């Protein structure tokens, strides 16, 4: 799994590619988010368009991140989940909990609307 992160307009963008299945990747993701939460970044957009596969541990990481942001008065948006992550979100009914955007611009618009 490859992870890339940038901050734009006060929003943390995290882009994943590969498989989101836990193990050391989970800790790396949480470390990235925690370091930016310390910088008072309260909104996050996670790009799942290049994630081929996600398991229950990966779903758990996403739920954990959502909880971190919402408990601090922020929000998290998922950007364009690929086919398998989209199916897993629907299967677990988490598509009703997460906000899903089609692209970066839509994510920014949705995050600014709740701020």
Image (cartoon, rainbow, N blue to C red):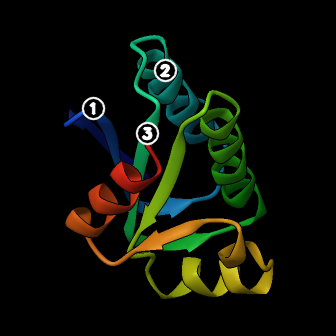
**Residues at marks 1 and 3, CA–CA distance in whole angstroms:** 7 Å
Q: Please, is residue 35 above or below residue 25 in the view?
A: above
User: According to the image, label 1 marks what residue?
Assistant: 10
On the rendered structure, is 23 left or right of 101? right
Instruction: Say which element carries label 1.
Output: loop
Residue 74 position, x and y percent, is 54, 37
Q: 78 or 28, which is in the foreground?
A: 78
Give whichever of discs 2 and 3 has the lower sequence position.
Answer: 2
Front: mark 1 or 2: 1
Residue at 28% from the left image edge and 69% from the top image edge: 106
Do the numbered discs 1 and 3 sit on residues whose CB atoms are within 8 Å? yes
User: According to the image, label 3 marks what residue?
Assistant: 43
Q: 11 or 91, which is in the foreground?
A: 11
Residue 101: which disc?
none
Front: mark 2 or 3: 3
Residue 98 position, x and y percent, is 62, 65
Residue at 43% from the left image edge and 52% from the top image edge: 1
Residue 89 position, x and y percent, is 67, 77
Q: Please, is residue 80 above or below residue 97 in the view?
A: below
Give whichever of discs 1 and 3 has the lower sequence position.
Answer: 1
Q: Assess disc 2: are there few (<14), some (14-19) or many (≥20) residues with their C-alpha within 10 Å of its C-alpha.
A: some
Residue 23 position, x and y percent, is 66, 42
């Amino acid at each position: 799994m490859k992870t890339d992160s940038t901050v734009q307009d006060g929003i943390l963008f995290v882009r994943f590619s590969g498989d989101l299945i836990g193990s050391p990747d989970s800790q790396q993701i949480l470390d990235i988010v925690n370091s930016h939460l310390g910088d008072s970044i309260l909104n996050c957009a996670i790009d799942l368009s290049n994630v081929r596969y996600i398991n229950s541990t990966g779903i758990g990481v996403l739920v954990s991140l959502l909880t971190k942001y919402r408990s601090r008065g922020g929000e998290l948006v998922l950007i364009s989940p690929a086919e398998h992550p989209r199916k897993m979100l629907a299967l677990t009914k988490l598509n009703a909990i997460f906000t899903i955007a089609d692209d970066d611009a839509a994510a920014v618009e949705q995050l600014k609307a709740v701020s």
